[in-house]
Image (cartoon, rainbow, N blue to C red):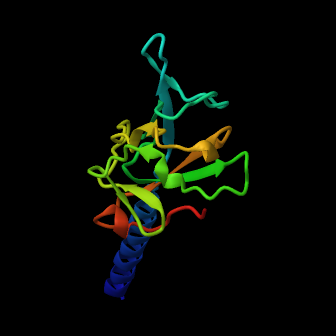
Amino acid sequence: MQRNKRIIAVLAITSILAVMVFQTLAFFTAEDTALNRVTMGNVALILNDDTIDPETEEMEPFPVEGFDLVMPGDVIDKIVSVTNDGDNPIWVRIKLDRSLVLEDQSADVDFSVLGLDLNEEDWTEGADGWFYYNEILAPGETTENLFTQVTFPTSLGNAFMNAEVEIDVLAQGVQSQNNGVTVQEATGWPAE
């Protein structure tokens, strides 16, 4: 009987110690939180539409009001390029919206008689009428000029007298990362 009391006492003490050890272990815990923040990149560009001031020979923005009293044989400096103003590399394209408003609406003239010195080495004209820059444009970089001059040939006839020529320029950019190997393969262009 004594022996049973000792066994019961040893078991009771062992049980109490076991409970105390488990309770102590329960208080030794640790916790950690992982913050997973993902910041999306951006695409931003600046359309450079400049001219050369004939007096200072400095580059300046092309005047909104344009040029008056242009004559056959004149050459107007219109320098068009794009600068990547975002944080990520981009593909770039430019569209030229060309219009010719004649004083005599009945005249039949072709806008293509006006000369643009298009840069066909660095830019490729797509079947959709857009000009695509052949290289990826890194942040802070500027494309080669699409064109630098508009030439009014001496062969222009009286149909062009008092005509208004407009060349509006629209530039677009899309991410180049994970978006095609060439600019022609790129997708996600903004709707026109």
Q: Estimate the x, y position of residue 140 in percent, counting from the top left.
A: 38, 36
Where, quadrant-wise, is the N terminus in this rendering? Answer: bottom left
Q: Is residue 158 left or right of residue 23?
A: right
Q: In terms of image quadrants, where is residue 9?
A: bottom left
Which residue is more in the foreground, 31 or 73? 73
Furthest residue in direction top, as rendered: 56
Instruction: Name the one closer to the observer, 154 or 150.
Output: 154
Residue 192 on image: x %, y %: 60, 62
- Residue toward you, 180 or 33: 180
Residue drawn at x 33%, y 44% is 138
> Is 60 drawn above or below residue 179 in the view shown?
above
Residue 12 percent coordinates (x, y): 41, 76
Whether residue 178 is visible: no
Visible in this render: residue 130? yes
Residue drawn 49% across the image and 18% down it: 53
Residue at the image position 55 percent from the left and 29 percent from the top: 62
Which residue ends up furthest to the front in the rendered image? 158
Task: State the image quarter where residue 124 is shown.
Answer: bottom left
Counting the numbered discs, the total is: 0
Q: Residue at x 44, y 70 (%)?
A: 19
